[in-house]
Amino acid sequence: MKNPLRFGAIFPIAPCLLAAAATATGAQAALPDPVRAMIDAAIETGDADKVATIAELAKATNPDDVDEIDAVLAAFDAEQARLAAQAAEQEERAIREAGLFDNWSGRGQLGAFRSTGNSSNTGVTAALKLQREGIDWRHKLSAVADYQRNNGVTTREQFHIAYEPNYKLSGRLYLYGLGQYERDRFQGFSARYAASAGIGYLVIDDDAIQLSVDGGPAYRRTELIGGDTTERLGGRAALDLDWRIADSIKLTEDASAMLQAGSTTLLASTGVEIKIDDSMSAGIAYVIEHETDPPAGSVKTDTLTRITLIYDF
């Protein structure tokens, strides 16, 4: 793996390491000049894999100089570890000293949707996700809006806003809190508020797949179109999967369940993203929302197909 700091950009490390190796072996370096130059060039790249490969070749072709080459490798490894520790310390200091609006990353989406269920139409969709990684805390903000008007009449109006702070207990275990607001009068409610807290776990975390699950108790207040209000305690569970199945293709799955006596909401979004360039992707997502006890006049299941352009920043 390449070190994030190139050795050659800091000082001419290769000659220094060879000199140190010579001192360590108690004699002046005896490596032939072409072999020395080859090792120097590998060390200047700062690429540990390349240095190891060149060193193995050098030892195979110069068996009498194995001790000197091993000393060079030991000095290189020690310097690489020092620089990595220095970079990690600088990164941690930068995070701890960052202001409230620093270190945010995110993505924006804009596109069209097709819905079936309580309404059957095509309209525009927009979404925004923001995330801030700290030493102990992770903050997530998200917002989604689907909207359409036909002949001056609104036929789709759905908004969802959520904020989720995470406190990291360990490398994979975390505590979460969640506050969210929804509005969808075609599902029968003018406002729905939810709050939840619990524990989460990062089940898989590698370059190709990230999978996390979390859950805990929840409270939800629903303000119905007719004027009635319901308040219920229950539980919440969620799953978040990102799977890069190829360099330019990613599969996503976001699912959640709000479990309450007499009224349960199940939500699942399955998507595919195709990378266009470093910051732009095209995506298609199929969303299913199921209410076990919807307001009078509403059907239990809504589906939505979104086609969007995605910009990462």
Image (tube, helix red, strand yellow):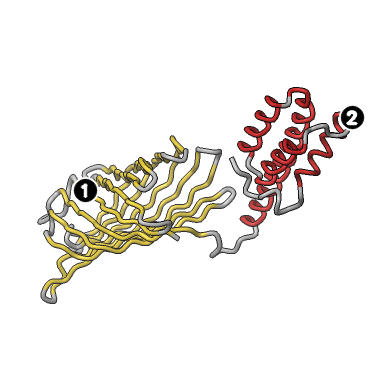
Location of residue 4 in the rendering, given as x and y in whole percent from the top left corner? 62, 48
Amino acid at dot 2: Gly
Residue, far bottom: 152
Locate residue 201, reporting x and y percent.
45, 38
Above-or-below relation of 253 to 284? above
Q: Amino acid at mark 1?
A: Ile
Residue designated by label 1? 288
Left or right of residue 210, residue 62 in this image:
right
The answer to which quarter of the image holds residue 199 is top left
Give left or right: position of 93 versus 296. right
- The quarter of the rendered structure image containing the N terminus is top right
Q: Secondary structure at mark 1?
A: strand
Q: Which mark is residue 79?
A: none
- Residue at the outermost top position: 63
Which residue is identified by label 2? 26
The answer to which of marks 1 and 2 sits earlier in the sequence is: 2
Residue toward you, 25 or 94: 25
Drawn side of residue 82 relative to residue 130, left or right: right
